[in-house]
Amino acid sequence: RAGRVGVGSARWMGLVVASAVGGWGWAGTLFPRTTRVTARVTKITRHPAALEVEVQAHSDMPTFKAGQFQTLTVPALSSEPHPFSIAGGTGQTRRFGVGVSGDWTRALHRRLKVGDRIDLGAAQGRFSPPSGPNRKAALWLAGGVGITPFMAALEAMEPDPSAPPVTLIYGFRGADGAMGLHALRRHAARLPQLTLVAHDSTLIGRLTPVNLAAALKTLPKRCDLYMCGPEGLKDAARAAHAQAGKRGAVRDEAFDFRAALSLSDLGG
């Protein structure tokens, strides 16, 4: 009869294969494969509202791109994974920046110690500030712990006076709250294409559209904008970028720690 597919026919086999592939993909969304690596804490730097953590595994970990994040599980605290941006690392090491923003991160800030076990998930995320010579000129904007993905990008960047310029504005509250500031200054000293603006709001007030517009004036018309920080700061940067008539991509990273994972990558 018309419309009937005979068992064993070529069409029947095609439907079976298509159904199997679809079922496999659907099952993968329900039960995603995870890559877990066990490491130990080797270094901790505590700030009033943040934590810098370095861990080391016994063997090389899977590679990561600057700007990606990994989930961290600390068995001494709980079995729940939490996502944090990768601040850098080599084959066997990783560095992370952790903002103190809830019960779990407060407990981590208080109780984590060198030697503790940490289980790391696979590197994920699409927020990747370009660090190679073929990128466009850019304004990088970080607020507080939002500096973390940019630290990894700067670690991967090579000195090149002919490369497109990057201006990094880092807003923080007080020297004690400036995560990785010494490392950022070292990068600024070795990278002629980088201009670092360290903005301490306790000394010169909050970052405003006026501050951001002044930084944008020094950059070419074709200028990308990468942001990681509070929503109000990012809104101000978007407005300043548009008002300055800049053309280029606008990229924004945001984590929802209480919902486990949520990453947005907005194009402009």
Image (tube, rainbow, N blue to C red):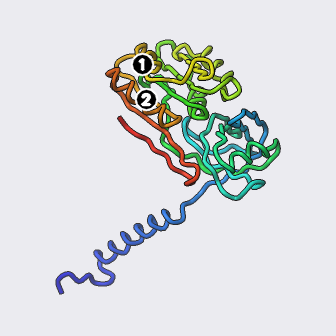
Callout 1 secondary element: helix
Residue type at numbered disc 1: Ala
Q: Residue at x 62, y 20 (%)?
A: 187
Q: Which residue is mark 1?
A: 213
Looking at the picture, which amino acid does disc 2 mark?
Ala
Count of numbered labels shown in the rendering: 2
Residue 205 visible? The answer is yes
Of 249 and 227, the residue lying toward us: 227
Q: Position of residue 159 (x, y in %)?
A: 56, 17
- Residue closer to the observer: 24 or 115: 115
Callout 2–callout 1 Cβ contact below 8 Å: no
Image height of 235 relative to 101, above or below? above
Residue in the foreground of this view, choosing between 17 and 220: 220
**Tag 2: Cα neighbours inside 10 Å, few (<14), some, or many (≥20)?**
some
Determine which of the numbered discs, if any, sits on residue 92 in the image: none
In-image side of 240 versus 120 (left or right): left
**Does 60 sit left or right of 125 as displayed?**
right
Which structural element holds mark 2?
Answer: helix
Image quarter of the C terminus: top left
Query: At 20% across and 81% down in the image, what residue appears?
Result: 3
Q: In the image, 159: left or right of 106?
A: left
Give the residue number, with chain letter if any, for mark 2.
Answer: 236
Q: Specify the quadrant of the image occupied by residue 164.
A: top left
Q: Earlier in the sequence, mark 2 or mark 1?
A: 1
* Residue farthest toward the bottom in the current orientation of the protein: 1
Query: In this rendering, is residue 47 above or below 159?
Result: below
Give residue 146's quadrant in the image. Answer: top right
Asked if residue 164 shows in the view, the reply is: no
Split into 4 quadrants, where in the image is the N terminus? Answer: bottom left
Label 2 to label 1: alpha-carbon separation:
10 Å
Q: Could you say where residue 60 lies in the image, as x and y percent from the top left?
A: 69, 43
